[in-house]
Amino acid sequence: MTYKAGDQVRDEFNVPIHKLIFQKIKKTCESGKPGWIILDENKNEFTSCFIEDFDLIEKYLGFANSHIPSNRKQSHSISVGIRPSKMITLTFGGNYLAIKTYKDIDSVHLSLSLSKDEYTIKCYGSKDITILIYPDGAVMTARPNFDRKYYPTTVKNVIQKLPSDVQKALFEEFAGNSLLYKDFMTDKFLATMRLTDLDKKFNKLDYFQSAFPDVAFPKTANKMNCYELYAIGCAEKYIEPEQTGLLFEKDYRIDKVQDFTPSKRRCKEIGKNYIKSILKQKVTEEVLYEFDFFIDDYVEMAMELKEKIDIKAGKKKIRKLHDKYAERLLKKKHRGKIKIPETPLKYLKLPKEFILLDAPGALCQEQKRQHNCVSSYIGRIEKGSCIIYSADINGEHVTIEIRYRKTRGKYTFIVPQCLKMWNECCSEETLKYVKEQVKEAGEQAVKKYERKIERKAKNQ
């Protein structure tokens, strides 16, 4: 069914939709189904919580009651850790129904009274969004701080914030003849479509074809996971056009899609990660784990150069394209000396066996020698994210990436990569020595940097 503004939507008993939903949800909460607990109730408002591990709480209660003496003189308290559970407060008004949600609850506080059969349960959770349902069928969401701005309620709001039984009650009311909501619930898919638009899409194929009109989804899409379909929709534009059909074939399907929140703004990132997963699953079964670095760099550089990605490529071709793209990026972006910005990294001075690669030519030479993509890091160096050193230690020539981080006002240096040729890991002995030298030199670098900042502040 489709709800239009101004309509008084009623069922066969002439009940307005917001009241009908209030009755359905309240009935669900009061059904006595294991896990549902009524925390507070009056005529037009009640607070209820669905606890995932309710059987665990019952065991705790049974254990506590069996070990407390019958002549006890005071009450006892227990806190029980649980899987994230959800709590709601329903407020029914004459012209609206408000469903207040809370942050996920991960513990329940049990207060045992002097009687073994009496206890109270307190669930702690700060308030989150409020979903408002009106008699005309409109459904809006207000933010936690209630900034008086309202937004159309989405499927994501419902699945993310409400217990599954309440999700079902809402979806059944707004989905009409569509079965799409069942797939969303099964996959826990945080779709950004409006709740009131559920009746406009019948199944997964219908929904994803409209979300990604340039992708030719086959009928078998209805049997695939929603997150997999979304990732394919995001990835399709970045691969060779003649290979798009392969995304739906068994050999190119991912065993487990990386967790992500569907978002058009993050579409490129989602597609990029999905393509990396395809290549890693396909290629690295035969080669060393370190080849993952090559795949990451190949995909990153191809997308930066706007080159289509070959998902059929084997390790030999990936290495060849990797080196080719790295050289192209070097020529395209940088011709002068690299300027290291004012960060603690600028003041890091390592022993003589470490060589700072602070020129495009030096990085290019290192890249050719090591068969890596170190020249593509020039942009990161210029932003102050990292610096690159090379060194010969314990008979190993290594390329070293060094970064810094600030935690509670304190700077520390880290070594995320210390790799040999073809991005193979160096020995533990070499890595330990590099980290020790970076830590020792880093302490001096931080002092120099902080003195520089102090002098600059005094001169202003």
Image (tube, grey):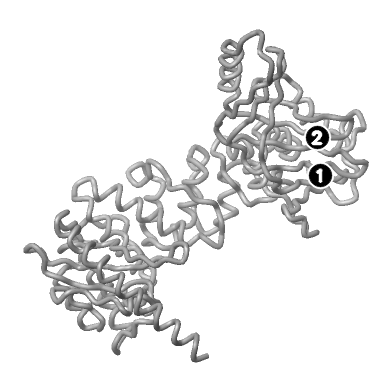
Name the residue at 66% across, 42% down: 161
Name the residue at 38% across, 44% down: 254
Find out whether the residues at labels 2 and 1 contact each other: C-beta distance under 8 Å.
yes
- Which residue was labeled with disc 2? 21
Q: Position of residue 36 (x, y in %)?
A: 69, 25
Name the residue at 20% across, 64% down: 434
Q: Nearer the viewer, residue 348 or 280?
A: 348
Q: Height in image: 87 above or below 54? A: below
Residue furthest to the left: 395
Residue 62 occupies quadrant: top right
Q: Position of residue 276 (x, y in %)?
A: 35, 55
Which of the labelled discs sits on residue 110, or is there none?
A: none
Name the residue at 32% across, 56% down: 311
Residue furthest to the bottom: 459
Q: Position of residue 155 (x, y in %)?
A: 66, 46
Residue 8 occupies quadrant: top right
Q: Amino acid at mark 1?
A: Ile
Secondary structure under tag 1 reads strand
Q: Height in image: 179 above or below 237? A: above
Which of the labelled discs sits on residue 133, or is there none?
A: 1
Q: Position of residue 4 (x, y in %)?
A: 84, 49
Q: Height in image: 269 above or below 129? A: below
Left or right: 118 in relation to 387: right
Local crowd at mark 1 within 10 Å, few (<14), some, or many (≥20)? many
Secondary structure under tag 2 reads helix
Q: Nearer the viewer, residue 80 or 65?
A: 65
